[in-house]
Image: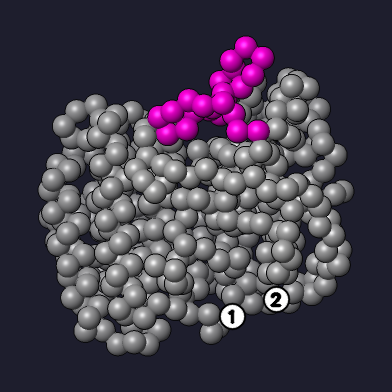
């Protein structure tokens, strides 16, 4: 389904919503390999929701904005009650904090799958009777983007729990690309999305001029081989390469190498979805925190790109600039564009401004229909569970 969800027509949306749900259920079923009991409980992870809660939350989100005609995420915004008696009590992320989600007495996996099927059936029926204008299709595009994004989070959880992935994600080797540098002349770009872009997230509003000075950027992401030189040089033991926040994070982690790296004599191996393999030297780094990326840059005498530099490069059309294998850290804090105001899903961006960091690009687990050089993603600096790498720029 190689089309953008932002401008998808009703028939395309219907097919994509069904595809997204099939994919969600495929990923959810993988968690059975590490389930602790029949209620589908898994070991607690600090950044990941319980998969059973995630499954219910995805369908609850679609029910809230489409079937219940909620115009915002305010608890009183829905026009109808949930199909589940305690749906709002269980799955409203505004009122159910992360820790509480691990302690909820939720319905069985079978019951929640039935709920998912009934919600989708009603969503597709309503979509078949909806208009073709942007306003009518907005909640469907929102629900599709939400489920696709949560699907990637489910995939991250499977890696964290060392669970084997289903195809096609199981065969996700990233091809090696020649390393090099690109000199960009700089200039004024239009940062953000235009008003005729179809669906636009609130943090992308609106397009505005931004001057980008000349800069030199890596054509590809930092590889395992490059990063292993930093590790071999004692990078994790040398405080001078780490920020104060990075040193605090490093001490709390008690780590001397990246997550999922395993020492094998003189060599390194890594964990990949239930398998252990020799560290692929030419593949880009993944599961790396902002602090680790910053420390590498300090060691290498380089820097991370700004968010504007990344968008400039991605839209330049330069044949050597490759993106989309992994999300990429930037040096830019996640902050609003001028004139920002929250959309219906009001807690999507606003609570994360200035605490999270901007990441750009996409990963192998990102569905093609939501990839865009304009898409502004964001992540807490300490997180390394997501499929994030980084590239560097010359000082």
Q: Quadrant of residue 384?
A: top right
Residue position marked by numbered label 1 in the rendering: 194
Q: Is residue 18 magenta?
A: no
* Callout 1: SS: loop
Residue position marked by numbered label 2 in the rendering: 190
Asked whether residue 49 appears in the rendered view, the answer is no
Identify the residue shown where x is 31% and y is 53%: 23
- Viewer-closest of 52 and 226: 226
**Above or below for 369 versus 351:** below
- Toward the top, the furthest residue is 265
Is mark 2 in CB contact (under 8 Å) with mark 1?
yes
Q: Is residue 276 magenta?
A: yes
- Viewer-closest of 92 and 107: 107
**Above or below for 42 versus 75:** above
Q: Quadrant of residue 87?
A: bottom left
Residue 58 placement (x, y as % from top left): 30, 56
Residue 67 placement (x, y as % from top left): 22, 71
Residue extent of the magenta highlight: 259-281
Q: Is disc 2 surrounded by few (<14), some (14 to 19) or many (20+) residues within 10 Å?
A: some
Residue 147 placement (x, y as % from top left): 35, 58
- Viewer-closest of 49 and 7: 7
**Above or below for 93 versus 344:** above
Asked whether residue 383 appears in the rendered view, the answer is yes
Q: Quadrant of the N terminus?
A: bottom left
Identify the residue shown where x is 34% and y is 52%: 93
- Viewer-closest of 353 and 46: 46
């Amino acid at each position: 389904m190689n089309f953008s969800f932002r401008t998808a027509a009703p028939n395309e949306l219907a097919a994509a919503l069904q595809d997204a749900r099939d994919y969600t259920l495929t990923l959810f079923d993988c968690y059975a390999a590490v389930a602790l009991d029949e209620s589908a409980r898994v070991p607690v992870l600090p950044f990941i929701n319980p998969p059973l809660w995630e499954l219910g939350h995805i369908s609850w989100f679609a029910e809230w904005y489409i079937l219940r005609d909620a115009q915002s995420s305010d608890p009183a915004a829905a026009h109808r009650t949930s199909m589940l008696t305690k749906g709002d009590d269980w799955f409203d992320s505004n009122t159910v904090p992360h820790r509480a989600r691990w302690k909820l007495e939720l319905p069985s996996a079978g019951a929640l799958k039935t709920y998912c099927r009934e919600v989708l059936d009603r969503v597709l029926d309503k979509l078949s009777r909806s208009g073709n204008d942007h306003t009518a299709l907005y909640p469907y595009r929102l629900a599709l983007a939400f489920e696709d994004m949560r699907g990637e989070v489910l995939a991250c959880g499977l890696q964290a729990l060392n669970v084997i992935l289903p195809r096609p994600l199981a065969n996700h080797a990233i091809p090696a690309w020649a390393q090099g540098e690109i000199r960009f002349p700089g200039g004024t770009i239009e940062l953000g999305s235009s008003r005729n872009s179809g669906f636009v997230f609130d943090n992308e509003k609106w397009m505005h001029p931004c001057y980008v000075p000349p800069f030199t950027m890596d054509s590809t992401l930092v590889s395992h081989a490059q990063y292993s030189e930093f590790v071999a040089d004692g990078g994790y033991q040398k405080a001078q390469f780490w920020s104060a926040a990075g040193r605090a994070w490093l001490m709390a982690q008690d780590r001397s190498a990246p997550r999922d790296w395993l020492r094998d004599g003189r060599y390194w191996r890594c964990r990949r979805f239930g398998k252990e393999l020799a560290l692929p030297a030419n593949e880009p780094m993944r599961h790396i925190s902002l602090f680790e990326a910053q420390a590498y840059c300090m060691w290498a005498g380089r820097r991370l790109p700004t968010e504007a530099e990344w968008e400039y490069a991605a839209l330049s059309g330069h044949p050597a600039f490759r993106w989309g294998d992994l999300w990429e850290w930037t040096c830019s804090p996640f902050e609003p564009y001028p004139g920002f105001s929250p959309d219906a899903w009001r807690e999507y961006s606003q609570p994360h401004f200035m605490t999270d960091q901007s990441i750009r690009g996409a990963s192998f687990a990102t569905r093609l229909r939501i990839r865009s050089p304009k898409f502004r993603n964001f992540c807490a600096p300490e997180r390394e569970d997501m499929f994030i790498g980084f590239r560097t720029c010359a000082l």
